[in-house]
Image: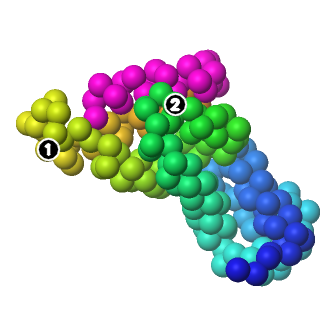
Amino acid sequence: MAKVDRRILKTQESLKKAVIELMTEKNFDDITIQEIADRANVNRGTIYLHYQDKFDLLDKLIEAHIQEIREMGEWACKLDWSHALEPFFEYFAKNYLFFSTMLASKGAPSFRTRLLEFIMEGFKGEMDNEGGRNEELYEDVLLQYAGNAYVGVIEWWIRNEMPYPPQTMAKQAGTLLGRTL
């Protein structure tokens, strides 16, 4: 795989940061390409060198975060719930501006749906089907319940400006998920 020029990465990061900052101020639908360009301190045409439009920029930004979470999940699933969730809550805390904006924004309601779908997919392999605890439950119902509960806890934690440290949240959410799945 060819190494991407640092200038391109810097420009893309600047554009992503600009769109998130603007989304904290106004609805995504009201943000213009020119505003993104001005905030990122680039020419309007530069955006079109990297993205089709502002929707493509937002989509790529969301997908980059989902991909990072996906990569963390590949090794975290080998740990118990509390320890497995710790890197995720640390990631949410480190990227607080992104997650608080995405979860609060009326202009990006698809983010919660994409996050939920990703989490439910990850939970599929974690369900206790042999222990008897979930034998009378349908898989899709259990996944909806656990996925929405977990995303809801993340939303609550972020919207309340992270009142507990990531380690505490991982332990709390891990205990609850361990009882459920």
Label 1 neighbour load within 10 Å: few <14, some 14-19, many 20+? few
Which quadrant holds the C terminus?
Answer: top left
- The answer to whether one can see residue 26 in this image is no
Which residue is located at x 86 percent, y 64 percent?
10
Measured in 3D between alpha carbons, the distance from the residue under mark 2 to the one under mark 1, in whole angstroms, is 27 Å
Amino acid type of disc 1? Answer: Tyr
Which residue is located at x 36 percent, y 53 percent?
121
What residue is pinned by disc 2?
Answer: 83
Q: Where is residue 5 in the image (x, y as percent from the top left)?
A: 86, 75
Amino acid type of disc 2? Answer: His
Q: What stretch is highlighted in magenta?
A: 161-181
Q: Which of 55 and 88 is in front in this view?
A: 88
Which residue is located at x 70 percent, y 80 percent?
1
Q: Position of residue 24 (x, y in %)?
A: 70, 43
What residue is pinned by disc 1?
Answer: 138
Q: Where is residue 11 in the image (x, y as percent from the top left)?
A: 85, 67
Could you say which quadrant of the image residue 180 lies in?
A: top left
